[in-house]
Amino acid sequence: MKTKKQFQSPKGTFDILPEDQKYWEKVRKVVARVALGYGFERIDTPIIEDADIYALAGGETADVVEKQMYVFKSKGGDMLALRPEGTAGVMRAFLEHGMAQLPQPVKLYYIAPMFRYEQPQAGRYRQHHQAGFEIIGDQDPVYDAQLIHMYLVVGEELGLKSLSIEINSIGCAKCRPTYRAQLLRYYRSRTAKLCKDCKRRIKKNPLRLLDCKEEKCEQMRVNAPNLIDHLCQECHDHFKNVLEYLDETGVPYVLNPHLVRGFDYYTKTVFEVFLEDEHIEGGNEKTHQRAKLALGGGGRYDYLAKTLGGRETPGVGAGLGMERLIGVMKKQGIKAPPLYKPEVFLVQLGVLSKKKSLRLFEELRKAGIVVAEAFGKDSIKAQLRSADRLGVKMSLILGQKEAIDGVILLREMETGAQESVEMEKVVKVIKERLKK
Ligand code: AMP
């Protein structure tokens, strides 16, 4: 027998309550509009995937894979993971459905929940949502720039002030090994001063040393060699072109030579989106971590398809954190229109009128009028109070007498003026009044 207790949503997760839905809807609408405007079509992939997909795509040493992934064995014995990020699943779908046969590039977007076993704190949850865009099948730097530009456009259309982009190139399989060797040389003599995680990273994945948020490691990074200085000609030209295209579209950016991303699948361009002046503070009292939190991030992933067993297919993509975005919208006082805004309230008094009200309610609703009711209440006072609270323009009052006579009282809420309208004409009359 299970014991009864006061249940709460699991740690690090939260409910999106009705009063917050308008913000979510606004972001979803803007994301869909911008996506369509740039030729993206929506894709939805399952929340669960074969866990190997992330291990292959992200790399076994990626924090997200190694420490934060929710992995479980299904009843059939498959090792499945709750999706920690969007790109790998979208690439799996691209390969599985032969999308390489379609005109390239294929542009796909999604809005989906992600799961990461993190220490919950401000802006960091165990279930969060990302709006992601992926451009698959073309390696032209113009698409890196277009994708980055789109993030600014989403921000602008939401009315957000001052988004800024930090950008870097992390090279390719040709130039990275030389850089890696340089980085190792720099860090090896300083290993003793590194945090525990970085001591491990230096052995397994030295590039990740650049990503550490520990203060002492951040300080050491300042003089570490830059990848940009070690790019091969191809990566150098690619990056130069991305920056030129960004200049052309007026996208402001800051070069951050130490920017690396959490997943191993990235090549060449990587970027993150921040608020220009304001930092969203992360961390909590316990960790004293005051890391600057990104609103979104992404980059190019030209080897991902091959890593997942497909033909080499270039791609570039990024995800925007919906919770952080909505947090900033609220902080900046950005309004979202209410989703439920009734226009008319239907008041009923007595058994016969309640029955007739049901049919009238349907007629009004079918005519596209947003109508509210309190069918469970009998008193006219209580029902009018509800109407007032909802801020409707008009109420329709159907008493016993009106029900018999085939009429209804129309009350203008602002003035309190009432008039009798024939039941057959009421939908038409209301429609006309609402137009005014
Ligand atoms: P990432 O690929 O990890 O950079 O994630 C992309 C974006 O998703 C980040 O810039 C954040 O805005 C958001 N994000 C990532 N992890 C979390 C989390 N645990 N809680 C809330 N938002 C997150």
Image (cartoon, rainbow, N blue to C red):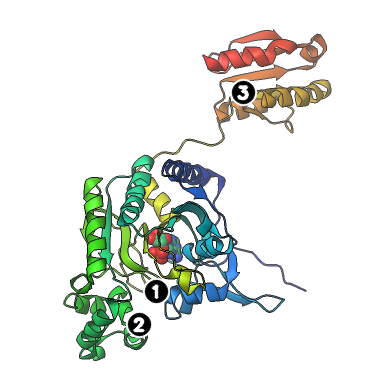
Q: Is residue 366 visible?
A: yes
Question: Do residues under tags 1 and 3 come within 8 Å of each other at their CB atoms?
Answer: no
Q: Earlier in the sequence, mark 2 or mark 1?
A: 2
The x, y position of residue 388, in whole percent, is: 57, 26
The one nearer the camera, 402 or 426, is 426
Q: Which residue is mark 3?
A: 344
How many numbered dots are placed on residues in this image? 3
Q: Is residue 341 left or right of residue 147?
A: right
Rounded to the nearest whole Å, what is the CA distance between mark 1 and mark 3? 56 Å
Q: In the image, what residue occupies the spot 68% across and 27% down?
A: 365
Q: In the image, what residue type sits under mark 3?
A: Val
Q: In the image, what residue type sits under mark 2?
A: Asn
Label 3 Cα crowd, 10 Å radius (few <14 / some 14-19 / many 20+): many
- Locate residue 183: give its quadrant: bottom left
Task: Kindly report which numbered mark, 1 or 3, lies closer to the viewer in this rendering.
Answer: 1
The x, y position of residue 154, in whole percent, is: 38, 45
Does label 3 point to a residue whose CB lies under 8 Å from ligand 1? no
Label 1 Cα crowd, 10 Å radius (few <14 / some 14-19 / many 20+): many
Task: Say which mark, if any, is on residue 205.
Answer: 2
- At numbered mark 2, what does the secondary structure look like: helix, strand or loop? loop
Q: Is residue 124 visible?
A: no
